[in-house]
Image (cartoon, rainbow, N blue to C red):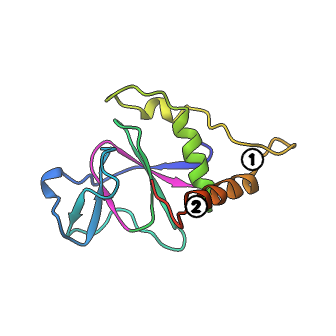
Amino acid sequence: MDFFSPITVKNKVMIYDIKNFGTTPVYASDSSYKNNIGYIDDEPEFYVNDEQSMYVIFGDHTKSMRIIETNFSVTDNVKVLSPKIKSKNSLFFVMTSWLANIPDLGYSRHWSIAKKTKIKLPVKSDNSPDWEYMERYIENLKLKCNIANYNI
């Protein structure tokens, strides 16, 4: 967890409050949703700004992860993390490595294991993370896949 700080979710959105249209996107634990599951007209609980340019959400039951770059709220069973990594490419690399090492427990809660799971990263000779390698790797992957942007 050296790369993330968990944030307490104080106001979880109830499913029956979610609509097809609104001002604030809502995210859920369900991995079948590639985007938000709907909207509410309330103020977002989490704001993206100069100090906090992105968040990571973790679906506790589904172990899905996603980078969020807009103001938002969440439903139950979603962990919100503040990444200490400021580069989206490096963050994506770290998340992918972390996710690959979290065992699949089916539709059980994964957070208790995920927060203890070691994240395996490429390192330099001094044993510090090789951020340049991670940046290049993701940039090359995006070029190979012919995508300009990505999101999980």
Between 78 and 9, the one nearer to me in the picture:
78
Q: Is 15 positioned to the left or the right of 114 in the image? A: left
Which residues make up the magenta segment?
Answer: 71-84
Relative to 64, 11 lies left or right? left
| Quadrant of the image occupied by residue 138 | bottom right
Above or below, 36 relative to 113 = below
- Depicted 31 relative to depicted 132: above or below: above
Residue 88 tag number: 2
Three-letter amino acid code at the position of disc 1: Pro
Considering the image in quadrants, where does the N terminus appear? top right
Asked if residue 97 shows in the view, the reply is yes
Q: Residue at x 51, y 55 (%)?
A: 82
Question: Which of the pair 75/150 is nearer the observer?
Answer: 150
* Distance CA(mark 1)–CA(mark 2): 15 Å
Compared across the picture, whether 36 is left or right of 20 comes to: right
Residue 129: mark in rendering: 1
At numbered mark 2, what does the secondary structure look like: helix, strand or loop? Answer: helix
Residue farthest right in this picture: 125
Q: Which tag, 1 or 2, sits closer to the chain's start? A: 2
Write the residue at 52% across / 67% down: 53
Report crowding for label 1: few under 14, some 14 to 19, many 20 or more residues within 10 A (C-alpha): some
In the rendered image, residue 82 lying in the magenta stretch gets the answer yes
